[in-house]
Amino acid sequence: NIQPWFAARRRKEGEMLARGRSIPQCRGYARGGVPTALRPSLWAAALGSGDTPGDHRARSLFERLCGDVKRRELLTDALCAGEARELCDHPHYFPFEECMRTVLLALTRDAAVPGLCFASGRCVLHPQLRGTGRRGRGFGSYPPGGVLPFRGMASYIAPLCYLYLHPADVYPVFRALYVRHFCRLHVISDETSPSPALPALCRAFEDMIHGAEPEVCFHLLQLGVPALRLAAPWMIHVFVRHLEVEQVLLLWDRVIGYDSVLPLAVAAAAIIAFRRDALLAAQNRDEVMEAIEDLTQVQVVPLMQDFLFRGAPSSSSFSSSSTTGDGRGAPSK
């Protein structure tokens, strides 16, 4: 267990960084995990969203976007409602249907999103539809946010509903996460480092798991279930539909801290390696799916640490200081 004096020091350090709002320092802190009480303010600072929870500017923007939703109905509104409704079948997220729907609708009206994705140097949203009126007059991107709602998009919002009380506080952090990281998970692009788009992310996963567990990969291939087919849904949905909420938040700490979606590939490879024996014992596709169906007991950060440092001289000592509880690591000796 973590020592109380270290927990108190770690918490105090996080509070100081959240007040200072230095993006590099907040990201560096998030790499070791963020205490639950500090996540709302420290994530906002690390993402450079420019707003703290309850900030009047965030409320003003959100209310303006909601006003646009009320004034003009779009065909994509039904897709947003359906996506939020589908995720509410999950036992952890059913109380947040209205919050997820409202935030998704706001994103579709936010004309700044495509520019923010491009300005971050991360990706360009495509394909984009162009709206045209009855008389042929162009209306720009349709929807204005440039993002067509897709299956799984509500996964990018659901864990944030545990951190923020009001959709107006959820929205700026969700938008910052989306334009900097999550937009890459549904874009076909040749972007690689430091934060790869989906093709390079899948390649990174395959390189790691093939190097670490070639026997498992060959066995899965013989059964007609390549390892990537198991891991792709985890990465695309940022593990929201698969891990416990606290484990998802710990994993997102690393995504924000390292300013990259690569931790998603590391987590996927670590879980496949962890389920090695069960996967090797599987004789058909159904048994493979059964072996990785229930991930609710997975402690994702210790698995990632063990996977990355397996075979290293210091692996045993590193594992003994694995992140526990609220994600705070033990002090180095």
Image (tube, rainbow, N blue to C red):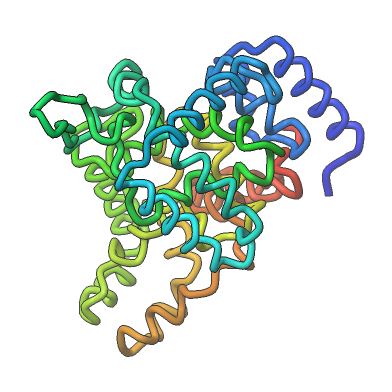
Q: Residue furthest bottom?
A: 283
Q: Residue furthest right?
A: 4
In the picture, measured across the screen, residue 321 lies left or right of residue 67, that is right
Residue 324, above or below 174: below
Residue 198, above or below 174: below
Q: Residue at x 56, y 26 (%)?
A: 63
Residue 130 lies, in percent from the top left, at: 16, 32
In the picture, measured across the screen, residue 231 lies left or right of residue 87, that is left
Q: Residue at x 63, y 45 (%)?
A: 161
Q: Residue furthest front?
A: 135
Closer to us: 305 or 201: 201
Closer to us: 73 or 23: 73
Q: Is residue 19 visible?
A: yes
Closer to us: 327 or 169: 169
Residue 243, above or below 224: above
Q: Is residue 333 visible?
A: no
Name the image quarter holding residue 30.
top right
Residue 144, above or below 305: above
Q: Residue at x 70, y 10 (%)?
A: 20
Residue 311 lies, in percent from the top left, at: 48, 51
Name the image quarter holding residue 14.
top right
Closer to us: 54 or 263: 54
Q: Residue furthest left?
A: 136
Residue 275 lies, in percent from the top left, at: 48, 71
Q: Residue at x 52, y 31 (%)?
A: 256
Residue 243 lies, in percent from the top left, at: 56, 60
